[in-house]
Image (cartoon, grey):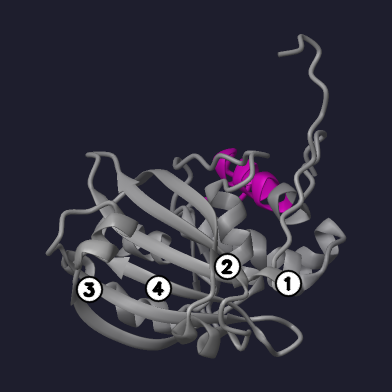
Amino acid sequence: MPAKASTNLWVDVARDLQDRIRKGKYAVGAVLPTEPELSVIYGVSRYTVRAALDALQQHGLVSRRKNAGTRVESSSRAMRFGASPGSIEELAQYGSEHLREVKSVKPVAAGPALAKLLECAPGTSWIRMGLVRMSTAGKPLSWIDVYVDPAYDGVIEDVMRQPGVLTSALIERKYGVEIQKIEQHISAISCTAALAKKLETPADSPILQVVRRYIDVSGKVVEVSVTTFPGDRYTHTTYLHRGGGGA
C-alpha cells in the first residue's frame, strides 16, 4: 500500500495497482490477480477491490471480461485521486456503490425552462435517459435525467449493460473523448408531483438538485446530468483541515 493513505481504501488499492502497472510489475497484456486474490493481498473486501478495478477500467488502464479476468491495457494514462468533494474519482466510487437502472430513453429538444437548467440554447437536441438509483433500504435514493449529445447515442446500450460505470466514462471509452472538467451546481428545490412519484416522497417536500455539465478538452458539453435526492436520503460529509499558512 502507498505510505500516504487516502480516506477511501479503494483509492489506495487503485493507486498502488496503477503504480505496479507503470513499473511493469503487471505488464501490458498481463492478467491481474483475481478479486479474491487481490482482497487477500491488500487486506480489504472484494467490494473495495471491485471499486478500485472499476476506476482503473474507467481510465483505460485495464479491461474486464466475465470469465477472462482483468487484463492490463495501458501503462501510461495517469489517474488523479483528489480529496476534493465532487472529484471524478469520487463520482466513480458513488456509481459503483449505488447501481443505476434505466427507466426511459427518448430524444428531446430543450424548451426554454430546460435550456435554462442545462445552460444550452433553446431547441438543442439531446437524448434523455431517465434512471433511478436505489438505496440499500429499497427506496429510490435518487432520480437522474442524463442528457447526452445525440452524436454519442451509441453509449445508451453500454449504460444499460454497465450500471456501475459513469455515463461520461463510457462515452470516453467508446468515442475516445476526454472529459476535462465537470461543472457542478447544487440547489435546494421543492419536489414536483412527477418527481414525487419517481422518488416515493411527498410532493412539495424539499429535495436536492445536482446539475453536472461534462465538458471535453475542446470545451464542448457532451453530457449533462440532473440528479435529484429526497432531503432525508442524502448526506455529504466533508472534512476540513487547518492549513499551515492560513487563508
Residue type beneath disc 1: Asp
Percent of width and height locating residue 188: 57, 59
Residue type beneath disc 4: Asp
Q: Residue at x 80, y 34 (%)?
A: 4
The mark lying in front, picked from 1 and 2, is 1
Let me know if residue 21 is in the magenta part: yes
Q: Quadrant of residue 114?
A: bottom left
| Mark 4 / mark 3, whichever is N-terminal | 4
- Marks 1 and 2, Cα distance to the nearest angstrom? 20 Å
Q: Quadrant of the C terminus?
A: top right
Residue type beneath disc 3: Asp
- Marks 3 and 2, Cα distance to the nearest angstrom? 20 Å
| Mark 2 / mark 4, whichever is N-terminal | 2
Q: Residue at x 40, y 66 (%)?
A: 167
Percent of width and height locating residue 26: 59, 51
**SS type, badge 3:** loop
| Mark 1 / mark 2, whichever is N-terminal | 2
| Mark 3 / mark 2, whichever is N-terminal | 2
The mark lying in front, picked from 1 and 3, is 1
Q: Residue at x 53, y 52 (%)?
A: 186
Percent of width and height locating residue 177: 28, 52
- Marks 1 and 4, Cα distance to the nearest angstrom? 20 Å
Magenta stretch in the rendered image: 13-27
Q: Quadrant of residue 5?
A: top right
Q: Is residue 37 left or right of residue 178?
A: right
Residue 232 shows which numbered tag? Answer: 1
Residue 95 shows which numbered tag? Answer: 2
